[in-house]
Amino acid sequence: MGVSQELLDILACPKCKGDIHLNESKNGLICDNCKLLYEIKDDIPIMLIDEAKPIEE
Amino acid sequence: MKALVTGAAGFIGSHLCEYLIEKGCEVVGIDSFTDYYPRSIKESNIAGLKDCGGFEFVEASLIEASLAKLLEGVEAVFHQSAQAGVRASWGESFKIYTDNNILATQMLLEACKDRPIKKFVYASSSSVYGDTTDLPMRETSLPAPVSPYGVSKLAAEHLCRLYFKNFSVPTVSLRYFTVYGARQRPDMAFHRFFRWALEGKPIEVYGDGKQSRDFTHVSDIVEANWLAFEKASSGEVFNIGGGSRITLNEVIEIIKEMTGVNFEVRYKDVQKGDVRHTSADMTKAKEVLGYDPKISVEEGLRREYEWIKDFMRR
């Protein structure tokens, strides 16, 4: 099903509460502020700080 | 109508989401997949929902999530998520209960202030009553939980009332009495009894089996949530039971007959936190909500048995 725009619109970074956006491969959500990637697995966005992956510069 | 369901991948939450979708609601489900029981079971609970139009799901913790955004456009909150388990709530693990049952509820209530929410339905528990001999349990009785779990559920119930009195968050608490049915958690009695029977193992019972419960089928619980959304006055508490109270030994006899397995029953020590009897006085739920449980224990057990046979084949 993929992650819908409606869902993306109501998600925020759990750490800074700031905006997030889909990454290019559409398998994760990026918080530019915290430099964290929240993975999307089986169409479920995993918005947990402990599970987030740091983004390498 | 747009609804937020917490604990959406859980036993009750997943049934509630399906019910709301059938009613034509948009549903946002949230679940943090705590490790109380395997993630794969919770994933299978929502497998059918994921392809439903109108259902969105996010894995998140109420303590961390940006709830303000998740609540955008939401008119009904069905707060089903909790750290379950009466017996596991002692000792060091109590912090998990204070976090997931009390703090998480407070944060959700806080986020609901000044929002156009029509009803916030909180899943409370008969465990708030404790081990009383004054049966049936009435909403007006003094709650005296005998487990840390019950304390955490009661604390959250009080928070719901407080947020109504002080901030007009339209909360309603439903005290569920021992819920069972398809997707019942693997640590719960009926699930274990059926599984052990089908595996040819003896059935282990805490206590002498003469303890009784007001068992409530999950479909009646789901219906009660909808009735609470539609009809309940805010700030109120309602008992939601199944309408008949039977002993575990009676349940075991039904399971023997249903499965055709003449299993051995082993009685073990009573666990701390367990109560002897529960029985819901449902006068208030009937009068105010029009709640009328429809599923008998025999019928509900048959439905759970059909589900568990399928579950064990997976």
Image: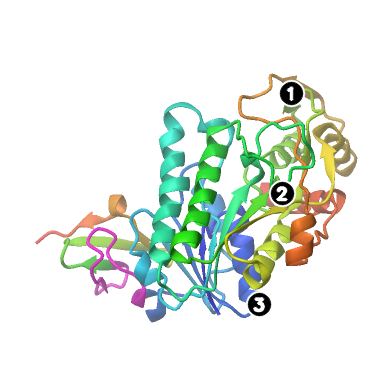
Position of B55 relative to A38 (above/below): below
Q: Secondary structure at mark 2?
A: strand
> Which residue is denoted by mark 3 in the rendering?
B23
The x and y percentages for residue B266 are: 76, 22
Q: Which mark is residue B160?
A: none
Inspect the magenta stretch and tell me whether residue B11 lies in it.
Answer: no
Residue B247, by quadrant, is top right
Q: Secondary structure at mark 3?
A: loop
**B288 to the left or right of B45:** right
Tell me which label, 2 or 3, sits earlier in the chain: 3
**B37 to the left or right of B203:** left
What residue is shown at x 37% (from left), y 65% (from top)?
Answer: B67
Amino acid type shown at disc 3: Lys
Residue B168 visible in the picture: yes
What residue is shown at x 35% (from left), y 75% (from top)?
Answer: A8
What residue is shown at x 61% (from left), y 53% (from top)?
Answer: B11
Amino acid type shown at disc 2: Tyr
Q: Which mark is residue B180?
A: 2
Residue B37 visible in the picture: no
> Range of the magenta residues?
A8-28
Q: Which mark is residue B207?
A: 1
The CA span between labels 2 and 3 is 22 Å
